[in-house]
């Protein structure tokens, strides 16, 4: 998750304790037969996406609604959502084509009850395809040092750590910069 300097996050976590992305909430687990579509994410889904982000980033900082408004209306936005057949948003990814023509994955999140079903992987493939169509050849992203699940996801997709980002997050947490060249 990228820190977007021009926006304040909605809240800051109190500590940088071990990142637990598997924290369970009281939402029932959908059946393993559930199928998902990947579709473009637009400003029409602003509130649904903002709410889902708050469920995803319970231990870190969630983006403000204003940030989502910007991210989903910017012409350089390349963003997708995963939806169940019932039309519920289960995950999202937001990318930006930066002025230097790198693709920047600013955030990706999957609802706790829909995790480990390859949704983040499918969303990442889709955003990479979207970047390719815009002539992006290099993708970058930032991840918390303690966010092992996300790092494993990115490594499985071919991203490599190229730089440490000390105190990148505003609560003092360190980050890692990861890069991937697109074919
Ligand atoms: C990180 C996150 C997006 C992964 O979403 P997901 O849909 O569960 O991930 P996928 O099912 O696509 O996982 C793909 C691969 O990533 C790795 N991975 C994903 N979650 C993992 C976990 N909890 N522990 C270890 N590896 C994990 C595995 O290699 C996995 O492949 P496998 O299931 O075949 O082993 C999700 O846990 C999340 O939303 N976390 C909170 C928000 C967050 O941290 N976003 C990233 C910010 S940088």
Image: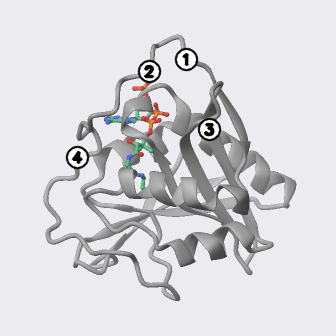
Which numbered disc, 2 or 3, marks the residue closer to the eye?
A: 2
| Whether residue 79 can be seen here | yes
Which numbered disc, 3 or 4, marks the residue closer to the eye?
A: 3
Q: Earlier in the sequence, mark 3 or mark 4?
A: 4
Secondary structure category for the residue under label 1: loop
Quadrant for the N terminus, please: bottom left
Crowding near the residue tagged with mark 3, few <14, some 14–19, many ≥20 C-alpha atoms within 10 Å:
many
Which numbered disc, 4 or 2, marks the residue closer to the eye?
A: 2
Q: Earlier in the sequence, mark 2 or mark 3?
A: 2
Q: Earlier in the sequence, mark 1 or mark 4?
A: 4
Secondary structure category for the residue under label 2: loop
Q: Is residue 89 left or right of residue 134?
A: left
Residue under numbered circle 4: 20
Crowding near the residue tagged with mark 1, few <14, some 14–19, many ≥20 C-alpha atoms within 10 Å:
few
Crowding near the residue tagged with mark 2, few <14, some 14–19, many ≥20 C-alpha atoms within 10 Å:
few
Q: Earlier in the sequence, mark 4 or mark 2?
A: 4
Residue under numbered circle 2: 30
In the image shown, does 64 or 117 lie closer to the viewer? Answer: 64
| Whether residue 157 can be seen here | no
Tag shown at residue 34: 1
Residue 88 location, quadrant: top right
**Residue drawn at x 39%, y 58% as measured from the top left:** 54
| Quadrant position of ligand 1 | top left
CA–CA distance in space, label 3 to label 4: 22 Å
From the Cβ of disc 3, is ligand 1 less than 8 Å away? Answer: no
**Residue drawn at x 43%, y 40% as measured from the top left:** 111
Q: Is residue 149 left or right of residue 104?
A: left
Residue under numbered circle 3: 82
Relative to 11, does residue 142 appear above or below in the rendering? above
CA–CA distance in space, label 1 to label 4: 24 Å
From the Cβ of disc 1, is ligand 1 less than 8 Å away? Answer: no
């Amino acid at each position: 998750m990228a820190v977007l300097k021009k926006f304040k996050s909605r809240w800051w976590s109190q500590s940088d304790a071990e990142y637990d992305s598997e924290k369970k909430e009281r939402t029932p687990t959908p059946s393993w037969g559930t199928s998902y579509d990947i579709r473009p994410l637009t400003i029409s889904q602003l509130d649904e996406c903002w709410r889902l982000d708050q469920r995803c980033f319970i231990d870190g900082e969630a983006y403000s609604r204003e940030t989502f408004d910007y991210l989903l209306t910017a012409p350089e936005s390349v963003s997708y959502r995963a939806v169940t057949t019932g039309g519920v948003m289960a995950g999202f990814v937001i990318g930006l084509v930066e002025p230097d023509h790198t693709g920047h994955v600013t955030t990706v999140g999957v609802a706790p009850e829909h995790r480990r079903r390859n949704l983040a992987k499918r969303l990442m493939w889709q955003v990479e395809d979207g970047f390719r169509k815009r002539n992006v050849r290099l993708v970058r992203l930032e991840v918390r040092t303690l966010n092992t699940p996300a790092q494993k996801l990115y490594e499985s997709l071919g991203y490599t750590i190229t730089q440490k980002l000390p105190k990148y997050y505003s609560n003092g947490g360190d980050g890692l910069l990861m890069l991937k060249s697109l074919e």
